[in-house]
Amino acid sequence: MRHISPKDAAELDATETREWLDSIDYVLQSGGPAKVARLLRELTLYAKQNGVTLPFTANTAYVNTIPADEQALMPGSPDIERRIKSFVRWNAAAMVVRANKAEEGIGGHISTFASAATLYEVGFNHFFRGRGDGDQTADVIYYQGHAAPGIYARAYLEGRIDETQLENFRRELKAGGGLSSYPHPWLMPDFWDYPSVSMGLSPLMAIYQARFMRYLEDRGLKPKTDAKVWAFLGDGETDEPESLGAITLPAREKLDNLIFVINCNLQRLDGPVRGNGQIIQELEAAFRGAGWNVIKVMWGREWDPILAKDRDGLLVKRMGEIVDGQYQKYSIESGAYLREHFWGVDPRLLDMVKHLSDDQLKKMKLGGHDPIKVYNAYKAAIEHKGSPTVILARTIKGYGLGEAGEGKNITHQQKKLNEDELRAFRTRFGVPISDAEIGHAPFYRPGADSVETKYMLERRAALGGPVPARRSRSQALPAIASEQFEEFHKGTDGRKASTTMVFVRLLSKLLRDKDVGRLIVPIVPDEARTFGMEALFRQVGIYAHSGQMYEPVDMDTLLYYKEASDGQILEEGINEAGSMSSFIAAGTAYATHGVNTIPFFIYYSMFGFQRIGDLIWAAADSRTRGFLLGGTAGRTTLAGEGLQHQDGNSHLFALAYPNCLPYDPAFAFEIAVIIEDGIRRMYVDQESIFYYLTVMNEQYEMPAMPDGVRDGILKGLYKFRASSTPGAKWRAQLFGSGAILPEVIKAQELLESQYNVGADVWSVTSYVQLYRDGHAADRWNMLHPGEAPKVPYVTQCLKEAPGVFVAASDYVKALPDSIDRWLPRPLEVLGTDGFGRSESRASLRDFFEIDHRYIVIATLGALARDGKLAPSVVQDAITALGVSADKLNPQVS
Ligand SMILES: Cc1ncc(C[n+]2csc(CCOP(=O)(O)OP(=O)(O)O)c2C)c(N)n1
Ligand SMILES: [Mg+2]
């Protein structure tokens, strides 16, 4: 056989490739892209059938998804838009520089917005829909938290934020008002819609927001519109599991109302996102694999003519082989360096750019900095049907900062620019500020009748008004009929029930209420059966946009698994984070969509605050309204499930969420009172609060509501049962909550019948409410020394109460301890500090020392320490009650 030299082989390869490409060209011209695609599919199939192994790839080449010749022309004036963008850039940087001059270390970020300015400005000028035509047509936009200065800077140019506020960036307590560091609706309720700076949460929340918009439409609570949900993310942010963890849902649900824009500046805080890889390709594969429409915006218009010359795919190949760390290096290097290192690897590549100077080479923009490319990507995204879109836009971090940080690893932290750097930045973007003034980094705002101001206001008016602009007004609901709740005040007459059963019964009643029924949004993470809610499947249906495309296996039963396009339950699967995101969407719909939906999210209590606490914090910040229900709660009340499930923590965590009202109700009437009042406060009085109720699975008789306790239930404490032997030799006050209250009642009976101690029993529905009220009074007293002191509610209840004070809780001891200081005598506390166990309820309560026997022992012990009775009485009780003094300490075992 004739020997073929390597050179000949290469030539042969090239010729072969050429011939195939020519054939494709021919089919493309004669039959169009669809025909090419069909042929390629058939070729691939044929090759596979004949033993050719093709590696799987979900990637396309390292180029723009939208070819130059398919681009639409951009409407509007590119010149004016560029000037507006420059002013926004300048003010965004100046506010950070000035804030840090005024107050060393106050922080802020310049480089994030610097890289994202075009991505936002194209949106503001051409796409983002405001609330002018009503809440229901407006887009919902999640801004990247660190880009906040740019969003403020634009609002300043639009005249919506004044100079004092800009001056007080990150100084929210200053006179004249300031601006919060990041998007926080709690702090700026007329501006920001959603918090986004805890990375990973906004993509998750955006996904569920888009789905919730569909839910509202499908259920007839909102007209169908083409409103979009936009989520702007950082590429580094996609490392958070929450960012990508739910991306299959929007594709599955065909949410073409959802658009992610990922600012791929290839850098995060410390350095490159993927120094040795390519984050854009990685994300493309992940999103395409999940079924998204992926639009890559890689290269600016300067690259188009060169790519057009790339007949052999040499440039595309070169683009695809550079790792991100190296691309970052190119971003800080000169044109000569690029010519040598990027283009210089192949003379044919060099040849493609020989007509360009080094300076021109350097100035070839990336796609994310080119308005035409970004405009076309957004246009394609909003026109795309049938799946969500992600735009992967390549940019440079700190774009325009030059020596001060552009593309450098330190750029994320850059918040100070010296005079030279400010001057260079100003000159680069042509901001009309003189050299004399530049050192002060003055803000720049053209006059109200300038071309730029008029243009931006006209554009915003055409797009439905300013964004971001949260509406804090919403229509109050009429008061809900109290008959709905009265049944629960009666007691169960000997029948046993759990508080979970009570809640579910109340929920199903509310779902039937003619006024609020359709506004209720039950949310479950695959636990409906755990909580005995399966009857609701049939009653109101499980929401599924596409209805039920199968015959459910239990179709012939009364409570079959009914999915329906107007179903009301959000069954989120095993997904507390997603469920919480739905809770936020539903609980903020009053502001976002002008719809007062009332979410009830019920979950395993251990997987709430402990697992998704940061999302609950975001809910609090977002002014979310609704009810969280921690089911199967209580360290010792949930038997058998063991250490990971048994929750003795959640009320302590809930204490730290300022606008969350946590309750640990024991009885049906307590639940009814709390929920009735909650609906009134949140939806009639429009308070920005939300509720957390623990509900348990232990069954006991529900007593009738005593007279005059409603107020105490809500405040956190009321006397449930006074002693039947108030004249007894000794006295005690016993406190219990939730499923432990029956243990306290048992202890009361034992103390009275066996030990001559007359005990009153108090239901503590909320230690946290008592704690907050106590501190509020202390604080007021501290600041008003000359006035009559306020008396905390818990003190008012107990200051005259005789005897010793003993509390038993299914939660950590810190909870009852938190009210100790407002009692006339010290509180003996029994609680469940430590790890749970797989055990029976009785054994668990013995192990954690909180059952009726320990309450008796603790009461007698306190009386003994007071000198009321001899220690031997306590010792005898310990023996008589069968308690071992040498048992393990649950707190450390
Ligand atoms: C949950 C969370 N962890 C850490 C941070 C701190 N942090 C703020 S910005 C940042 C880097 C951001 O990089 P990237 O997402 O790529 O955004 P860029 O600024 O590059 O656009 C980090 C680590 C945070 N805000 N949230
Ligand atoms: Mg980044």
Image (cartoon, rainbow, N blue to C red):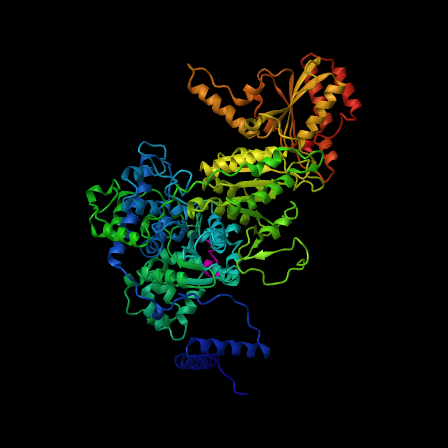
Report x, y in % for residue 863: 69, 16
Report x, y in % for residue 40: 49, 77
Residue 297 seen from this side: no
Report x, y in % for residue 648: 63, 35
Seen in the image, is 218 located left or right of residue 695? left
Q: Quadrant of the C terminus?
A: top right
Name the residue: 50% across, 46% down.
519
Seen in the image, is 670 located left or right of residue 494? left
Front in this rendered view, residue 112 or 701? 701
Q: Quadrant of the N terminus?
A: bottom right
| Rendered view: 259 above or below 449 | below
| Rendered view: 353 above or below 327 | below
Report x, y in % for residue 304: 33, 68
- The magenta stretch is 272-281
Q: Does the magenta-highlighted stretch encompass residue 279?
A: yes
Seen in the image, is 67 located left or right of residue 671? left
| Rendered view: 879 above or below 114 | above
Q: Does the magenta-highlighted stretch encompass residue 246?
A: no
Identify the main secondary structure in magenta.
loop
Front in this rendered view, residue 175 or 319? 175
| Rendered view: 14 above or below 832 | below
